[in-house]
Image: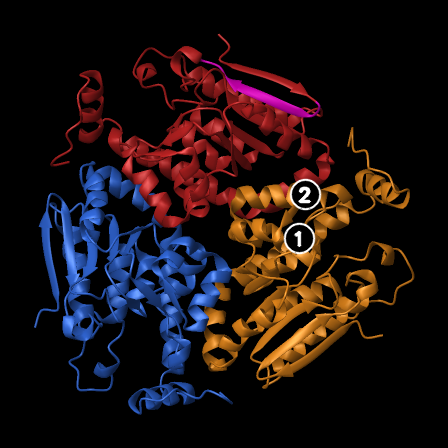
Chain colours: A orange, B blue, C red
Amino acid sequence: MAVIRSEVENGIRVVWLDRKDALNAFNSDMMDELCEAFLNAAADPFTKVLVLTGAGRAFSAGADLKAKGGPQVEPKHGLNGLLEAIIDFPKPFVVAANGLGIGIGCTILGLADMAFAAASARFRCPFSSLGITAEAASTFTFGRLLGHQKASWFLLSSEWISASQALDAGLLMEVFSDDGFIEQVMEKAAVLAKLPLASLMQTKALMMQPLRDSMKAAIVAEGEALARLAGGAANREAINAFLEKRTADFSGL
Amino acid sequence: MAVIRSEVENGIRVVWLDRKDALNAFNSDMMDELCEAFLNAAADPFTKVLVLTGAGRAFSAGADLKAKGGPQVEPKHGLNGLLEAIIDFPKPFVVAANGLGIGIGCTILGLADMAFAAASARFRCPFSSLGITAEAASTFTFGRLLGHQKASWFLLSSEWISASQALDAGLLMEVFSDDGFIEQVMEKAAVLAKLPLASLMQTKALMMQPLRDSMKAAIVAEGEALARLAGGAANREAINAFLEKRTADFSGL
Amino acid sequence: MAVIRSEVENGIRVVWLDRKDALNAFNSDMMDELCEAFLNAAADPFTKVLVLTGAGRAFSAGADLKAKGGPQVEPKHGLNGLLEAIIDFPKPFVVAANGLGIGIGCTILGLADMAFAAASARFRCPFSSLGITAEAASTFTFGRLLGHQKASWFLLSSEWISASQALDAGLLMEVFSDDGFIEQVMEKAAVLAKLPLASLMQTKALMMQPLRDSMKAAIVAEGEALARLAGGAANREAINAFLEKRTADFSGL
């Protein structure tokens, strides 16, 4: 079943994460479909700008915890395939965070060329509270965007931040009112889409060239670290607490 | 004809871009003369700090479009010579943007150790709207100063930003009132000029050492990219629209 | 005599710089003891977070100028040993600047994962005014935290900045009221100390991995530069002016 919707008009391709019943959480299908959306948009001569947003009220609740461990088809691209497709995407990539962003629903902002959020959106990186670690190259991108201190707090603490805090910290370019949010993002995208694609791609290529290797190195190191921590004592306690609807107890861990 | 003026007093060398009739736009002579001003200031034992500003109301309107294609003497240093002289300049380099800064009149702020602007100044990087791409190492420096998102928007969109927006974004250190602007900059420069030159140069050298290679790599890559885009379809449409005083139409480009 | 105090409770090790009579200035003993505090905290299974603060009203007045040149025991770790121990410290490192921070009492903020200051604290990097140069990897960290322009001004000018200016510039994560300052920092530290140590350490390791080599290269280059400038004409004039209680005169230097 399709969990991504996409349409292109006037050079702007809008891609919706569309699993409204699960707050647009990422399952294996969504990673593969979103990866293909980026690959197709890169090749499509009618796409100048890609805008990623969420259907319904959430942007994305992150990795689907319920999906984990269940019977799954082997993913075609997987998380790393998706992240590489985003890092290599040669045209402007705009995130329109219409509502809450958790985990990869937040760290993906670090991969955007411009990120906007609705005023009521809020964000959380719950990695420590799950006994795991950060992903999507956020251990590289967040320090550059937020400065090392705010990035450390945000990636380590599992605390929420509001759209306005995220804006002040540098994780967002601008915050728009909830009412008319996507229209305001589309006005920004339209400014870019009226310009020549060769210039947009060339300037982006020059800006990304010194960064892409570091971003790819980060996702490899993060993936290895996640594999070490997954299933460990803290991660098991986090999962058990989640299933038993209680607060996790990491004392001694 | 001299298009640069320069005078030194109390350790501060002030350099004026001085083509008032052309809003201090850069032609080939200005690049060569400004390059020599940096080389001379580096060698001059009486210069501790260099302040670059514009004569008249503008800081600089950028590359002189009218000068392009006309009969020109082969430049002695050219744009790359100028940029290398700035990147290698071993003493504090202060930009005092007294008025509008466009193109290299804006990207040069990314090469400054400190940049100040008058409250009424505004800035624009019109590269996409000209069918070309960014220069002066801005594809490296702007991401560090403004964060990737605001830098991407500013370098890609060809939109104006005000002095106050530039300050908030991190492109400027401080904005002063138009009235008494240069005097306020000179007070800052005087603080530095009272300090021992060996310390100023040593601390700057330590700060620049990890950056200079990346800045020089950026100007090489930008120069190659510009050569690819110059004369292309979008650049031709931009020039024709400019000559015909109409809005460029990049649809399909 | 011990010039460092340390105690651990609920996973948080608080370390006090404790030379109140000297505004917690760093002498050779303090460098060695603080280095060992970091090494011990790294190895201690009961320490999840280290909070560094100052006893009394100051955070630290920096290197103890009076101690210089006097008879000294050969330091065990020295400044470089201390800095390496901090850079390699694998757990969250929080600075709680309870009062003024000068020299290394300020540049050490650039090594923190999170830095907080009391509202009345203020900071100064007096390197140029002493005829020397910056240390503690600040020539690398400050440009990343404050942006090149504010970092250049702050490291070159020897001017004071207030806690609120330091916050705006990015040198601090948050400023708390003087009244109840350390309690407010401890609330932040407690958020981290409730989380699993393996996740805290892993995420910090991923964030630091691309930075540690650059930070260590910076302290080596800074150390060599300091050795070149120490005892030079400007440094001698600064020391003489200090001893003679007059303003230093660096004209011609």
Front-most of A106 and A88? A106
Numbered range of the magenta stretch: C10-19
Q: Position of residue A80 (x, y in %)?
A: 70, 63
What element does badge 2 sit on?
A: loop
| Magenta stretch: dominant secondary structure | strand
Pick whichever of labels 1 and 2 is earlier in the sequence.
1
Q: Quadrant of residue B107?
A: bottom left
Residue B228, image x, y percentages: 40, 81
Residue projecting furthest to the top: C1
Residue at mark 2: chain = A
Q: Chain of mark 1?
A: A
Q: Are marks 1 and 2 on the same chain?
A: yes
Residue C145 to residue A195: above or below: above
**Looking at the image, can residue B202 be seen?**
yes
Who's the residue at 71% across and 53% down the image?
A: A103
Circle 1 SS class: strand
For the residue carrying disc 2, how many other residues have a C-alpha within 10 Å: few (<14), some (14-19), or many (20+)? some
Viewer-side residue, C27 vs B168: B168
Residue C229 percent across, percent down from the top left: 26, 32
Residue type of the residue flagged with mark 1:
Arg
Q: Is residue B231 above or below residue A233?
A: below
Residue that label 2 marks:
A159
Q: Is residue C15 magenta?
A: yes
**Quadrant in which the C terminus of chain C appears:** top left
Q: Which mark is residue A122?
A: 1
Residue at position x 44%, y 55% from top?
Answer: B144
Residue at (19, 58) in percent of width and height: B38
